[in-house]
Image: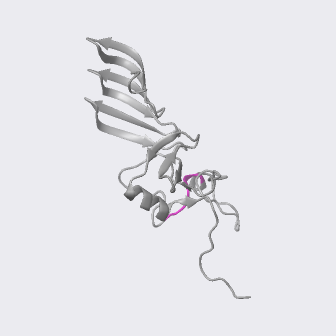
Amino acid sequence: MQYTGSKYFGGFVHGRMEGQASYILPTETKYQGEMKDGMFHGKGTLYFPNGSQYDATWEKGRIIKGKYTFADGLKYKENKWHYCDGYDRRFYTEICEGLKPAGISQLTNIDPPRKIPDGCYDCGDGFYDPKVRVIRDYKKRFLRNADDDEHEWIIRTCRKGWDEFIGHKAKL
């Protein structure tokens, strides 16, 4: 594993990862579950650094079925997904704990929201710096380079680390 930066804790059969194991990727995503012939196989869970997890049944490294749970406990539903849709725009914490009083806004599901570094965007799994097109996690570790499609999506939809006046400005 020294070549990939991963860590493996478990058994080997014929030199291949096998049985109950823990496998930690360089991104600190951790798999706990069954392995067979060096692949995820059987029941296992991926634990992501942001606190979310994916419980799944695997076959030869491929997902057969699974369920994703966000860090705040919200469970993703493939059908009848009503969280933050066109009808109900509340954050999950607002659904669970109620809305704030009038005049007090909640900008993200995390309250208070993370402070975004100047010139950057919060893209959900880290901060994006459009000058170098790099996404770093919230602990400032490299995650990935953004391709053109992701760059455009982030610029168009994500929260900025600066204030920008938009709309009508009265002449004084």
Q: Quadrant of the C terminus?
A: bottom right
Q: Position of residue 108 (x, y in %)?
A: 59, 56
Measured along the vertical axis of the image, is residue 170 above or below residue 111?
below
Name the quarter where the N terminus is drawn: top left
Residue 165, magenta (yes or no):
no
From the viewer's perspective, is 96 left or right of 135?
right
At x 39%, y 53%, the residue is 147
Residue 56, quarter of the rendered image: top left
Tell me if 110 is positioned left or right of 83 in this view: right
Residue 169 in which image quadrant: bottom right
Query: Would residue 91 be counted in the magenta stretch?
Result: yes
Q: Would you identify the image quadrant in which residue 19 lies?
A: top left
Q: Is residue 85 left or right of residue 105?
A: left
- Viewer can see residue 49: yes
Name the dominant secondary structure of the magenta segment: loop
The residue that appears at 56% across and 60% down in the rendered structure is 159
- Percent of width and height locating residue 29: 46, 33
Compared with residue 95, is residue 168 higher up or lower down, i.e. above or below?
below
What is the tally of numbered marks visible in this picture?
Answer: 0
Residue 69: x, y in percent? 46, 42
Q: Is residue 164 above or below residue 8?
A: below
Q: Is residue 88 above or below residue 44?
A: below
Magenta-drawn segment: 88-93
Q: Is residue 81 in view from this perspective?
A: no
In the image, 163 versus 30, the foreground residue is: 163
Q: Would residue 38 be found to the left or right of residue 71 on screen?
A: left
Q: Which sits in the foreground, 55 or 9?
A: 9
Relative to the observer, which residue lies in front, 168 or 119? 119
Q: Position of residue 101 (x, y in %)?
A: 70, 63
Q: Residue furthest front?
A: 132
Q: Nearer the viewer, residue 29 or 99?
A: 29
Residue in the image at 47% along x and 56% along y: 83
